[in-house]
Image: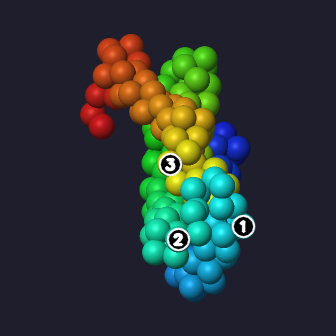
Amino acid sequence: MGRPPLVVVFVAILVIALGELGGAVLSQLRPATARWAAARVAANPQAHGLTGAAEYDETVRAQAVFATEAGLSFFHTHAEGTGLVLFFAATLVASLVRRRATRAALYALLTMGALFPLGYLVYAFAVLRLGRDAGVEFAEAWVLTPLGSSAILGLIGLAVVLASPRGAPEVPAGR
């Protein structure tokens, strides 16, 4: 069985560790996170469309705080999963893909795809900086879509190579 490059293994472990850290921080610091997010909304009233009307502003603030917490929560859960997917898929690439250029391309796509959860951190902070809708749109357009597409292309590429008669190695008789 082959071994993926150490940088790929490092990224997989780092993403998993960051996901675990994000979950621990969010579970222990949820009230402090909500207060901080509400303060960021209040400090940037134009981006959030605050009007000075208490009832309306409270609804807008609550939605922005919820979106920020959701981004942090999505980061936590996706980081744990994508790190494992990268490790598993990269091990398959190392073990079963013959062509060096194909391996390199798959490693690059899969590693970039494993960084997908970082898009949810961008999402959480962009909501506070740009407003809820603009922040979500920014994160989706510039981080989540490109990194998610990379993950999908890497996994499809791996599946195509493995399904190809020349892509996977032959298993010796008697095994």
Using the numbered discs, state the Cα–Cα distance from disc 1 to disc 3 in whole angstroms.
Answer: 17 Å
Q: Residue furthest left?
A: 174
Q: Is residue 130 above or below residue 106?
A: below
Q: x%, y% of residue 10? A: 67, 52
Instruction: List the residue tagged with mark 2.
Output: 53
- For mark 1, does the 10 Å Cα neighbourhood hold few (<14), some (14 to 19), or many (20 or more) residues? few
Q: Is residue 39 above or below residue 2?
A: below
Q: Amino acid at mark 2?
A: Ala
Depth check: give the residue in front, 72 or 170.
72
Identify the residue position indicated by label 3 in the image.
133
- Helix, strand or loop at label 3? It is helix
Q: Quadrant of the C terminus?
A: top left
**Distance in Å between CA atoms under marks 2 and 3:** 20 Å
Which type of secondary structure does the marked residue at label 1 adopt? helix
Q: Nearer the viewer, mark 1 or mark 3?
A: 1
Q: Amino acid at mark 3?
A: Asp
Q: Amino acid at mark 1?
A: Ala
Q: Earlier in the sequence, mark 2 or mark 3?
A: 2
Q: Is residue 59 visible?
A: yes
Please indicate whether residue 172 sits to the left or right of residue 41 in the image: left
Which residue position is annotated with label 1? 43
Return the disc, 2 or 1, that comes first in the chain's sequence. 1
Tell me if 148 is positioned left or right of 143 in this view: left
- Residue 60 higher or lower than 95, as above or below: below
**Residue 111, numbered label:** none
Task: State yes or no: discs 2 and 3 in contact (Cβ < 8 Å).
Answer: no
Q: CA distance from mark 2 to mark 1?
A: 16 Å
Pinpoint residue 20: horizontal percent, then vertical percent: 56, 70
